[in-house]
Amino acid sequence: MYALSSFVAGFVFGTGLVVSGMVNPAKVQGFLDLAGAWDPSLALVMAGAVVVGAAAFALAGRRASTVLGAPMALPTTRVIDARLVLGSLAFGVGWGLAGFCPGPALVALGAGKLKAVVFVAAMLAGMLVFELAERARSRGESVPRDTALPGA
């Protein structure tokens, strides 16, 4: 049942990405080009995602288990630290340069787009480097992970 529900959720998500134009790097870059020919259409997609996500998190926060019976595992930290800020900046720069974020890149990869192949390879390499750095960091960690930024 978990595999079927995962497949259905992924299919609905991928279909939404295709219908909204999020798998088209030119459309994404048009949205991010505030000084040029700005395309605000993806703002509506994002607003819709935020509304659905907020409602889902509010509902999930009141539950002890998922619909399929697994324990509910929601994030607990609310700390804005340097790792979060730097990761967000790296994500934004990558999104702006390539016109892809991970979900749409995987959809475009499935469609055989060469640019998506390059992006996904770079994404996987970045994930590997991060994992190796985290392992090295955890072996020599003396500072708590959730050190907040000054003023946060």
Image: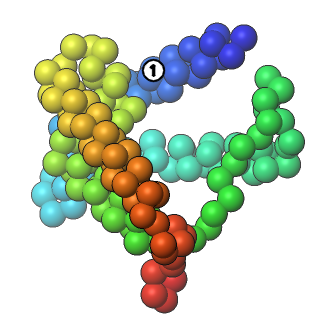
Give amino acid for label 1. Thr
Q: How many marks?
A: 1
Q: In the rendered view, does 9 fall on the left or right side of 72? A: left
Asked if residue 148 is positioned above or below residue 16 in the image, the reply reads below
Q: In the rendered view, does 49 fall on the left or right side of 117? A: right
Residue for point 19% across, 55% down: 33
Look at the image and tell me in which quarter the N terminus lies.
top right
Residue 24 appears in view: no
Residue for point 15% across, 52% down: 37
Residue for point 62% across, 67% down: 78
Asked if residue 59 is positioned above or below residue 114 in the image, the reply reads below
**What percent of the width, then of the height, locates residue 6?**
60, 19
Q: Quadrant of residue 110?
A: top left
Q: In the rendered view, does 109 fall on the left or right side of 146? A: left
Q: Nearer the viewer, residue 139 or 81?
A: 139
- Which residue was labeled with disc 1? 15
Residue 142 appears in view: yes
Outermost residue, front direction? 139
**What percent of the width, then of the height, locates residue 97?**
16, 48
Residue for point 77% across, 40% down: 72
Q: Quadrant of residue 113?
A: top left
